[in-house]
Image (cartoon, helix red, strand yellow):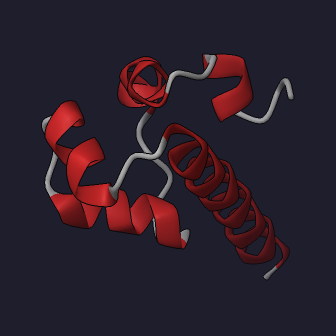
Amino acid sequence: MKQNKEDAADREAWASRIRSAMDEAGVTAAALAERMDVVKSAVYHWRGGVRIPSRQIHRKLAKCLKISVERLNGWAK
């Protein structure tokens, strides 16, 4: 049970960082999905804390949001 709570907390932390970065960049979910070449539902899942993006797309996501990978991952402010 503890693992599920940690996973949920990780997903919510990701969601919060992505929402914040999207707001700061003035990027909508539809625009981000288009830039990332993913379906809109993927972006909605990230924003909603349903899923964490795979490591393979962290760099592209950070670039599209104009933030560092470190900030996206919560390693830097």
Taking depth in this image into account, of 15 and 11 the one nearest to the observer is 15
Q: Position of residue 41 (x, y in %)?
A: 23, 67
**Residue 17 x, y percent position in the rendering:** 67, 49
Q: Residue at 71% x, 20% y: name it.
A: 70
| Residue at image point 13% right, 36% down | 37
For residue 8, above or below residue 74: below
Residue 9 lies in quadrant: bottom right
- Residue occupying image coordinates x 60% and y 22%: 67
Relative to 6, is 35 on the left or the right? left
* Number of callouts: 0
Tell me the quarter of the image containing the C terminus.
top right
Residue at the outermost bottom position:
1
Report whether 33 appears left or right of 39: right
The residue that appears at 20% across and 33% down in the rendered structure is: 35
The location of residue 20, given as percent across then percent down, is: 65, 51
Q: Is residue 53 above or below residue 62?
A: below
For the residue pair 40 and 56, the one nearer the viewer reads as 40
Quarter the N terminus occupies: bottom right
Q: Position of residue 69 (x, y in %)?
A: 61, 19
